[in-house]
């Protein structure tokens, strides 16, 4: 599966996703500056991304724990998600995300 990620400078990166891994892991492994301070435990919101081009509506809504973390994050937009909570799957093939500001 493919993930299209725009970094904070506006450069687009095409990343190969791995089934069952999180988008956060794929972004980090690709060398993008995702802090992911909690390591994917949904406890910090430092892996926030903006989900682009109608993909947000195609996903399951965020769980309460993710919503709580986003409530404390900076720069939250209506299409914000925590990339540690987005698991790579065929349904997300081609997803487009933008890294949120630090």
Image (spheres, rainbow, N blue to C red):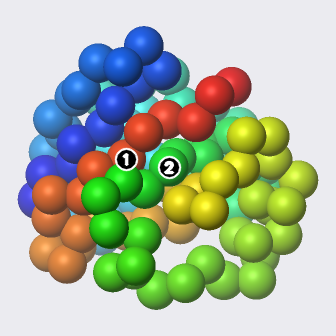
Seen in the picture, residue 18 relative to 12 is either above or below; the reply is: below
Residue 23 percent across, percent down from the top left: 38, 53
Q: Is residue 18 left or right of residue 67?
A: left
What is the spatial separation of the Cα atoms under label 1 and label 2, in whole angstroms? 5 Å
Query: SS at mark 1?
Result: strand
The residue shown at (55%, 84%) is 61
The residue most toward the top is: 9
Q: Residue at x 14, y 75 (%)?
A: 90
Residue 99 versus residue 24: which sits nearer the camera?
99
Label 2 CA crowd tier, 10 Å (few <14, some 14–19, many 20+): many
Q: Secondary structure at mark 2?
A: strand
The local crowd at label 1, few if under 14, some if 14 to 19, many if 20 or more residues have their Cα within 10 Å, is many
Q: Residue at x 19, y 78 (%)?
A: 91
What is the x, y in percent for residue 8? 48, 21
Q: Where's residue 22, x and y in %?
A: 40, 59
Q: Which residue is mark 1?
A: 97
Disc 2: which residue: 50
Q: Position of residue 16 (x, y in %)?
A: 14, 45
Q: Earlier in the sequence, mark 1 or mark 2?
A: 2
The vertical placement of 74 against 2, above or below, is above
Q: Is residue 3 visible?
A: yes
Q: On the rendered image, what quadrant is the N terminus found in?
A: bottom left
- Mark 1 in CB contact with mark 2 (< 8 angstroms): yes
């Amino acid at each position: 599966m493919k993930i299209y990620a725009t970094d904070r400078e506006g450069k687009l990166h095409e990343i190969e996703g791995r089934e069952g891994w999180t988008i956060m892991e794929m972004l980090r492994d690709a060398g993008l500056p995702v802090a992911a301070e909690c390591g994917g435990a949904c406890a910090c919101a430092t892996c926030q991304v903006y989900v682009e081009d109608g993909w947000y509506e195609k996903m399951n809504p965020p769980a309460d724990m993710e919503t709580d973390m986003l409530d404390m994050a900076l720069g939250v937009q209506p299409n914000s998600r925590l990339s540690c909570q987005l698991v790579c799957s065929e349904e997300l093939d081609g997803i487009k995300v933008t890294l949120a500001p630090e």
